[in-house]
Amino acid sequence: MGDEGVKRRRSRIAGISPASACRRTDCQLKRRWLTWRLFGLAYERILAMNILVTGGAGYVGSHAIKRLVGAGHKVVVIDNLVYGHRAAVGDTPLGVGDLSDRPLVEKLLAEHAIEAVMHFAAYAYVGESVTDPAKYYQNNIVGTLSLLDAMVATGVKKLVFSSTCATYGEPTTVPIPEDHPQSPINPYGFTKLVIEHAMADYRRAYGLSYAALRYFNASGAAADGTIGEDHKPETHLIPLVLDVALGKREHITVFGDDYPTADGTCIRDYIHVDDLGDAHVAAIEKLGAGDDGEPVELRVNVGTGNGASVREVIAACEKATGKPIAVVDVRRREGDPLELVADPYGAERLLGWRAKHTDINETVASAWRWHESHPDGYADR
Ligand code: UDP
């Protein structure tokens, strides 16, 4: 008996004709599909959050927004646009103002029914934090405390905070695990550490769930080429080297060639900014999952676990751009630790996240795609 025959016989047994059997199967499939779709939508709705992103017009913040929106979350930004770029935010709603503007922050939290905050807004020039600490204490500490109090006042209890490996200071073990002692060697790192302590106290007292993500060296640019790194002034290694390739600078100054490393230069863990964005998505979803129990507390290194020396980064830039890079060696820069590389296993364990871009050549190539197509960055100042 052929397939048709079998179908007809089975249909007769069930008391239905082959045509109606097909219709019924279609119907069942459609119903099943609809059930799964509704289940999926409900699941997304449960996980999807309204998120206020502070400093969303900046480098890391703008990349994180893309990943958050891609994951189904609804985002509202607050940024004072001192260093940020309006164009980096795209069509995400943006409130322009300072974190210390309590009425503005509370209005945004309430009007958009915000359930969680991602706090990127901060000053982050290490050298400037030494010469003008008041600026850093005021913005990074006082501004953040004002944000925390606005959250408490409006009942928003989830916070993902941009912390930094600079809270460790000069590490005694590398790769650096999360339980490494924190002993920052500059005011910038200290302001971030103060907020880590404040969040722990707010958790105990007010039930705040938080994740402190300790970034290593954020680098690269969004895969779709729409946003990238544009700091003015620029102090970071990769964009400065790419400026040499673009002919905007004559050479790159290498700070110290006498460190006890293979080529004498400092080693850093360059984490792709898209990976960094995904770590934020993983962190906020972990905080969301803790709704029914104890407030969540996460302290996580966000790095690749691989180190690259300054000279290796320059070589990667030569490879990506196809241009020779002129180098001038100078004395060590004050406050530069010898080697900062993340132990990546904490992030895997705590967030279920690991970096996808682990090759410095790939990360630099993505940065070059942005710089080559945007030689003046966002060209807004
Ligand atoms: N660096 C350098 N020349 C520069 C800028 C940076 O040699 O013009 C080195 C710096 O000493 C450090 C590494 O590059 O070892 C990364 O520095 P960056 O400022 O990008 O990030 P940091 O590690 O200071 O946060």
Image: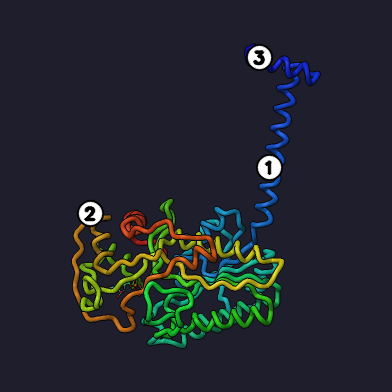
- Residue 173 on image: x %, y %: 38, 77
- Name the kind of residue labelled 2 in the image: Gly
Please name the residue that numbered disc 1 is placed on: 36
- Residue 137 on image: x %, y %: 49, 85
> Neighbour class for label 1 at 10 Å: few (<14), some, many (≥20)?
few
> Neighbour class for label 3 at 10 Å: few (<14), some, many (≥20)?
few
| Quadrant (top left/top right/bottom left/bottom right) for the N terminus | top right
Q: Which quadrant of the structure image shows residue 59?
A: bottom left
Please name the residue that numbered disc 2 is placed on: 322
- Residue 75 on image: x %, y %: 59, 61
Please state the quadrant of the image where ligand 1 appears. bottom left
Residue 4 image label: 3
Q: Which of 123 and 79 is in front in this view?
A: 123
What's the CA distance linking mark 1 and mark 3? 30 Å
Q: Nearer the viewer, residue 71 or 43?
A: 43
- Residue 83 on image: x %, y %: 45, 71
Q: Residue at coordinates 55% horizontally, 61% vertically from top-left? A: 282
Q: Are marks 2 and 1 in contact (CB under 8 Å)?
A: no
* Figure disc tally: 3
What's the CA distance linking mark 3 and mark 2? 64 Å
Left or right: residue 153 compared with residue 221: right
Q: Are marks 3 and 2 in contact (CB under 8 Å)?
A: no
Closest to the camera, between mark 1 and mark 3, is 3
Q: Residue at coordinates 73% horizontally, 35% vertically from top-left? A: 31
Among the two numbered marks 1 and 3 on one chain, the one whose residue lies closer to the N terminus: 3
Left or right: residue 66 compared with residue 312: right
Residue 363 image label: none
User: Compared to 181, does 349 lie above or below?
Assistant: above
